[in-house]
Image (cartoon, helix red, strand yellow):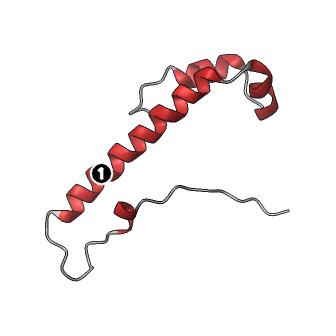
Amino acid sequence: MANVTMHKGYALGELRINKPGMTFLMTPVTFIASVLLAWQERLNERAALREIDSHLLRDMGISAEEAQKEAAKPFWSI
């Protein structure tokens, strides 16, 4: 069976510096926007992780201690 990984895609992440008509400042703005979106996603995921029941964590193969450790990380930390 093949492993499938799903990723969220954002239109901002698809912008490239070599596209015609792109200004010099678009790339930094795009980068900042993508970082902010990643931080928001991480914040939401860690908040959801705090709410998951211990039996569901066990189903996912995560201990309650590991979940709490991950959920306690700041949003900017990977």
Please report the residue visible at 60 percent of the width from the left and 18 percent of the height from the top: 68
Q: Is residue 78 visible?
A: no
Which percent across, then down, holds residue 14? 38, 68
Name which residue type carries label 1.
Ala
Direction right: furthest residue: 1
Is 28 located above or below residue 19 in the figure? above
- Residue at the limit of the structure toward the bottom, as seen here: 20
Please state if 36 lies on the left or on the right of 21 as rendered: right
Secondary structure under tag 1 reads helix
Q: Give the class, few, some or many, for how many residues have Cα within 10 Å of label 1's Cα (few <14, many ≥20).
A: some
In the picture, the quarter occupied by the N terminus is bottom right
The image shows a total of numbered marks equal to: 1
Q: Is residue 69 above or below residue 6?
A: above
Relative depth, front residue between 31 and 55: 55
Residue 67: percent from left, percent from top = 63, 23
Residue at figure coordinates x 70%, y 18% from the top left: 64
Q: Position of residue 62 (x, y in %)?
A: 73, 28
Quarter of the figure with residue 22 = bottom left
Residue at image mark 1? 33
Q: Quadrant of residue 7?
A: bottom right
Q: Quadrant of residue 52?
A: top right
Residue 4 in the image, given as x and y percentages of width and height: 71, 59
Q: Please say whether residue 46 is visible from this viewpoint.
A: yes
Q: Is residue 47 toward the left or the right of residue 65 in the image?
A: left
In the figure, is residue 36 to the left or right of 61?
Answer: left
- Residue drawn at x 59%, y 21% as measured from the top left: 50
Q: Is residue 50 left or right of residue 31?
A: right
Identified at 47% across, 24% down, the residue is: 73
